Image (cartoon, helix red, strand yellow):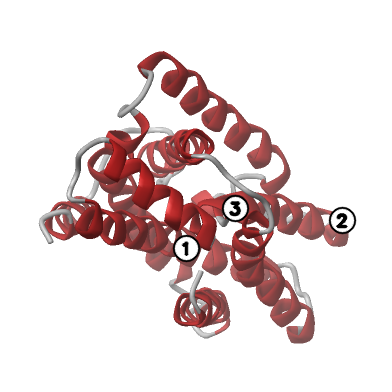
């Protein structure tokens, strides 16, 4: 992860979370639009940018690790309580432990998502695409950029939801800022941690498969449960947000 990507990630995610202190009355409706756009964008880049890498080798092993990533995300949401999907609940009893549990779950998920963004994995992406006969110089930078912005897009509503949780639970602003900083730094920390080890092209593909599994769980949960009202009504505003997210994923794949 370059210095530019590091600064961009931390600033964008932190500001998204701190925005929850400004948008108070209508934060739920704003969060739903952000989630709809994000879910569609993540789903789009998963199929258009990450799936081709995952299935360039053994399709059976790819399927196994995609399912593994899906299950890992399911376990992490046991800790985060689905805050990244907009499910915010007031817990007056033991609010400190609840908020820390949510922060822990989100931080662990963020740490794992940072692995493929390390410099070592960038080189693995280059070698992997080269070995399979692709225009590696172009697709290497494109796929890594799409993965980075896909993770950013996912963290924006997650940070907003985390900030909203701390605000609604009555935490002091200093704790809100500290929680957002911790969350924003976890993905760069994951990238740095991964760079300390030597990875093989197969290891890179496995990590991409795990990210795909997590992205599939995140995006589908967002698109199907963002309303949380027990019915399948989709407003025209949400449809527009979803279409814009999918269109952005398609357009960026053409560069």
Image side of residue 189 versus residue 113, left or right: right
Residue visible at 43% across and 33% down in the picture: 230
Q: Which mark is residue 157?
A: 1
Q: The C terminus appears in which quarter of the rendering?
A: bottom left
Compared to residue 141, the image places residue 232 above or below, namely: above
Q: How far is the residue under mark 2 from the one under mark 1? A: 22 Å
Q: Earlier in the sequence, mark 3 or mark 2?
A: 3
Residue visible at 38% across and 36% down in the picture: 220
Residue 86 shows in the view: no
The crowding category of the residue bearing disc 1, from other C-alpha atoms within 10 Å (few below 14, some 14 to 19, many at least 20), is many
Where residue 57 sits in the image (x, y, percent)?
A: 35, 25
Residue visible at 17% across and 54% down in the picture: 253
Task: Say what secondary structure mark 3 lies in.
Answer: helix
Q: Nearer the viewer, residue 34 or 57?
A: 57
Residue visible at 57% across and 81% down in the picture: 18
Where residue 19 sits in the image (x, y, percent)?
A: 51, 81
Q: Which mark is residue 97?
A: 2
Q: Which residue is mark 3?
A: 83
Task: Say what secondary structure mark 2 lies in.
Answer: helix
Q: Nearer the viewer, residue 219 or 19?
A: 219
Q: How far is the residue under mark 1 from the one under mark 3? A: 9 Å
Q: Nearer the viewer, residue 62 or 47?
A: 62
Count the labels in the image. 3
Q: Which mark is residue 54?
A: none
Residue 228 shows in the view: yes
Are the two marked residues, 3 and 2, in contact with CB atoms closer than 8 angstroms? Answer: no
């Amino acid at each position: 992860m370059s210095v530019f990507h590091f600064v961009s990630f931390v600033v964008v995610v932190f500001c998204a979370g701190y925005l929850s202190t400004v948008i108070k009355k209508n934060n739920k409706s704003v969060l739903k639009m952000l989630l709809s756009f994000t879910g569609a964008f993540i789903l789009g880049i998963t199929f258009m940018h990450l799936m081709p890498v995952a299935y360039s080798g053994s399709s059976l092993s790819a399927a196994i690790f995609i399912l593994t990533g899906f299950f890992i995300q399911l376990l992490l949401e046991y800790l985060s309580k689905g805050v990244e999907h907009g499910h915010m609940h007031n817990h007056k009893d033991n609010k400190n432990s609840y908020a820390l549990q949510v922060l822990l779950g989100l931080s662990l998920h963020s740490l794992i998502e940072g692995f493929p963004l390390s410099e070592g994995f960038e080189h693995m992406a280059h070698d992997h695409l080269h070995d399979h006969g692709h225009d590696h110089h172009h697709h290497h930078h494109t796929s890594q950029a799409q993965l980075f912005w896909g993770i950013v897009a996912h963290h924006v509503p997650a940070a907003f939801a985390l900030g909203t949780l701390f605000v609604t639970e009555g935490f002091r602003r200093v704790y809100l800022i500290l929680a957002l900083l911790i969350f924003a730094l976890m993905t760069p920390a994951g990238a740095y941690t991964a760079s300390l080890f030597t990875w093989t092209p197969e290891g890179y593909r496995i990590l991409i498969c795990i990210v795909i599994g997590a992205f599939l769980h995140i995006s589908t949960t967002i698109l199907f449960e963002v309303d949380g009202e027990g019915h399948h009504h989709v407003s025209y505003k949400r449809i527009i947000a979803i279409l814009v997210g999918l269109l952005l994923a398609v357009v960026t794949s053409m560069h």
